[in-house]
Image (cartoon, rainbow, N blue to C red):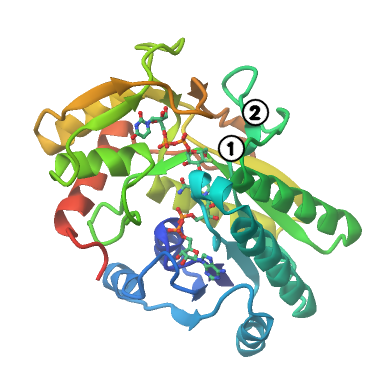
Amino acid sequence: MSTILVTGGTGYIGSHTCVELIEAGHEVVVIDNLYNSNIHSLDRIKEITGVKPKFYEVDILDRKGLDQVFAENKIDAVIHFAGYKAVGESCEKPLLYYTNNIAGSINLYEAMKDANVKTLVFSSSATVYGAPKSVPIREDFETHTTNPYGTTKLMNEQILADVCAADPEWSVLLLRYFNPIGAHPCGLLGEVPNGIPNNLVPYIARVANGTLEFLRVWGDDYDTVDGTGVRDYIHVVDLAKGHIKAVEYALGHKGADYVNLGTGNGYSVLQVLHAFEKACGKELPYKIMERRPGDIATCYADTKKAKEMLGWEAEYGIDEMCEHSWNFTVKNPNGIE
Ligand code: NAD
Ligand code: UFG
C-alpha cells in the first residue's frame, strides 16, 4: 500500500482515478483549487469506495501550500492531473495556459524534489503526436504540437525527461491519453463540462437531453469509413485503472518513459453518434458542417507498450462508454452537487 498525492483529484479523470486507487488499497491525498470541479466529488468517491480522500484546497502555483501538503503527509508518489485543458481557450489565452500548466507544474516538481518525493505519473495527451504520418500511433513517433495547450504537454514531457536525466533517483511515467469519455458505471462520477462542450460525447449528451438542438459534425469528407473524423475513445474507468498500473510500475523503476493509453480502436463521429442513440433510445439530430480547423482525419493508439510494460489494456467498448455517459447525464442534470 502506498500513499499517492493526486493533483486535480476532484476533476473528471482524477476523481475516477481516486476511486481505483482506493479500491486497489492505496491511500489518497487530493489537492485541487476547484477551478473546474466540485468539492462534492469527494462525497461521491466516498459513496463508491467507503473512503473520503484527505483534501487540500491548494493551487499548484502556491508553493507554501504544496510544501505544507508534503510536510503533513508521507507521500510515496504523485499523479499530476491539475491543469487547464481547453484547446481553443489556450489559443486565446496562451499566458494563462503556460502559467498554470508550466509554471504550476514546475512549482509542483520543485516541491516534490525538496520533499524527496521523486516518483510521478503525468497526464500527457495524444495531442503531442500532432498529425501522425500513420496509424496506429506508437510512442516513438515524432512529436509536434499545433496549439498552446498541446505545447504545455510537450514541454512538461521535456522538462520531466531532463529532470530524470539529471537525477537518477527520479521515476516518471508520461501517459499519453487518447480520447477519454464515459463515466463511472454507478452514475455518481462523470464529466461536467463548463459551458457549451467542445468535445464530441459531452456535446452529444446535451443533444440527447434536449439542452442543445443538434450535433454539428465537423466535416464528412475525410478519408475515413464514412468521411467523419476517427478517434480512439477510451472509457474513463479503464483510463483510471491504467494509472494504478502506471504508478505501481513507476514506484518500482527509475527514469522517464512514455506510454499511450488508448484502446487501439478507432470510431468515426457518426459511429459514436449511433452508439449514443442506442444508449439513450432515440434518434439524435445532426448536421454536416465544414471541417473544424486543426482537426485531423484519424487518430488511434498502438497499445502494445502499455500491455507489455504495464500489463494493462482497456476493457470497455464504445457501447458501454456511451451507456455510462448517458446514465451519468440522466442522473446528474445539474452536474456533481
Ligand atoms: P478536469 O478539468 O476535469 O480536471 C483538472 C482538475 O485540475 C480540475 O479539478 C481543476 O479544478 C484542477 N486544477 C486546474 N488548475 C489547477 C491549479 N492551478 N491548482 C490546482 N488544481 C487545478 O480535466 P480532466 O479531463 O480530468 O483532465 C485531467 C488531466 O488530463 C489534465 O491535465 C488534462 O490536460 C489531461 N488530459 C485530458 C484529456 C481529456 O480529454 N479529458 C485528454 C488528454 C489529457
Ligand atoms: N466533433 C464533431 N462535433 C463536435 C465535437 C467534435 O464533429 O461538436 C468531432 C471532431 O471533429 C473530431 C471528433 O469529433 O473528429 C472528436 O473531437 P473532440 O473534440 O471530442 O476530441 P479531439 O480528438 O479533437 O481532441 C481531444 C481533446 C484534446 C486532446 C485530444 C487527443 O479535446 O485535448 O483529444 O487526446 F488533445
Give left or right: position of 70 versus 230. Answer: right
Asked whether disc 2 touches disc 1, contact meaning CB atoms under 8 Å apart, the reply is no
**Percent from the top left, x then y, of residue 37?**
39, 66
In this view, the residue in front, 85 or 258, is 85
**Percent from the top left, x then y, of residue 289?**
33, 22
Q: Label 1: how many residues lie within 10 Å, few (<14), some (14-19) or many (20+)?
A: many
Residue 77 lies, with reference to residue 294, above or below; the image says below
| Foreground tag (2 vs 1) | 1
Give left or right: position of 246 versus 161. Answer: left
The secondary structure type at the circle numbered 2 is loop
Inspect this view and state whether residue 185 appears.
yes
Inspect this view and state whether residue 310 appears.
no
In this view, the residue in front, 56 or 71, is 56
Residue 224 lies, with reference to residue 278, above or below; the image says above
Residue position for label 2: 138
- Please, which residue is most extreme toward the right here? 166
Residue position for label 1: 127
Mark 1 residue CB less than 8 A from any atom of ligand 2: yes
